[in-house]
Image: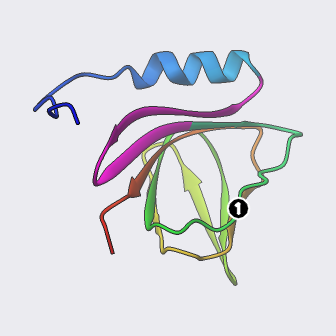
């Protein structure tokens, strides 16, 4: 196993632009033993097809607006907002035209 670099930059904006030009998707920008960070871009009319994850996660809205349905709740989100989603919770984004979020997964061993 290689040593973990103590600090390194990653270009979230470039990932966001690549994904928007491709019509949406997900790109990992950092991965280490305890955390994964990625950029997720959704472009209407494509629906958010994600399934519940095994890890806690946080979404930070980088651009756009929309709603996140989490189980039986609906959270309205706009640029600068963040929301926590617990592991295994059913969730999906709705009501967006174009939405870019930074996704932070807790990959810590359980």
Residue nearest the observer in this picture, 89 or 80 = 89
What residue do we see at 75% from left, 46% from top? 96
Figure coloring = rainbow
Mark yes or no: residue 63 visible.
no
- Judging from the image, what secondary structure is the residue with disc 1 in? strand
Q: Nearer the viewer, residue 22 or 3?
A: 3
At a point 45% along the width and 20% down the height, the residue shown is 13
Most foreground residue, 7 or 71: 7
Q: Is residue 13 magenta?
A: no
Q: Main secondary structure of the magenta part?
A: strand
| Left or right: 100 as drawn, with respect to 86 | right
Q: Residue 109: x percent and y percent?
A: 31, 68
Q: Is residue 81 above or below residue 13?
A: below
Q: Which residue is mark 1?
A: 92
Label 1: few (<14), some (14–19) or many (≥20) C-alpha neighbours in 10 Å? some
Q: Which residue is found at the position 58% from the left and 76% from the top?
A: 88
| Residue 72 sits above or below residue 70 on the image | below
**Measured from the top left, where is residue 92 in percent x and y?**
70, 61
Residue at the far left: name it. Answer: 6
Quadrant position of the N terminus in the picture: top left
Residue with the most extreme front position: 1
Task: Check the image and name the residue furthest to the bottom.
Answer: 72
Residue 49 visible in the picture: yes
Q: Residue at x 86, y 41 (%)?
A: 46
Question: Is residue 25 highlighted in magenta?
Answer: yes
Q: Is residue 49 above or below residue 1?
A: below
User: Quarter-wise, where is residue 89 in the image?
Assistant: bottom right
- For the record, the magenta segment spans 23-39
63 displayed left or right of 30:
right
List the single residue furthest toward the right: 45
- The front one of 101 and 77 is 101
- Hey, which quadrant is residue 42 in on the image? top right
């Amino acid at each position: 196993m290689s040593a973990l670099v103590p600090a390194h930059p990653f270009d979230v904006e470039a990932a966001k632009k690549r994904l928007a030009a491709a019509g949406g998707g997900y790109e990992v920008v950092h991965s280490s033993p305890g955390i994964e960070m990625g950029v997720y871009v959704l472009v209407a009319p494509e629906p958010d097809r994600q399934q519940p994850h095994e890890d806690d996660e946080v979404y930070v809205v980088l651009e756009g607006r929309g709603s996140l349905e989490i189980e039986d709740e609906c959270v309205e989100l706009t640029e600068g907002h963040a929301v926590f989603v617990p592991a295994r919770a059913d969730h999906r984004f709705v009501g967006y035209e174009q939405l870019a979020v930074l996704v932070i997964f807790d990959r810590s061993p359980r």
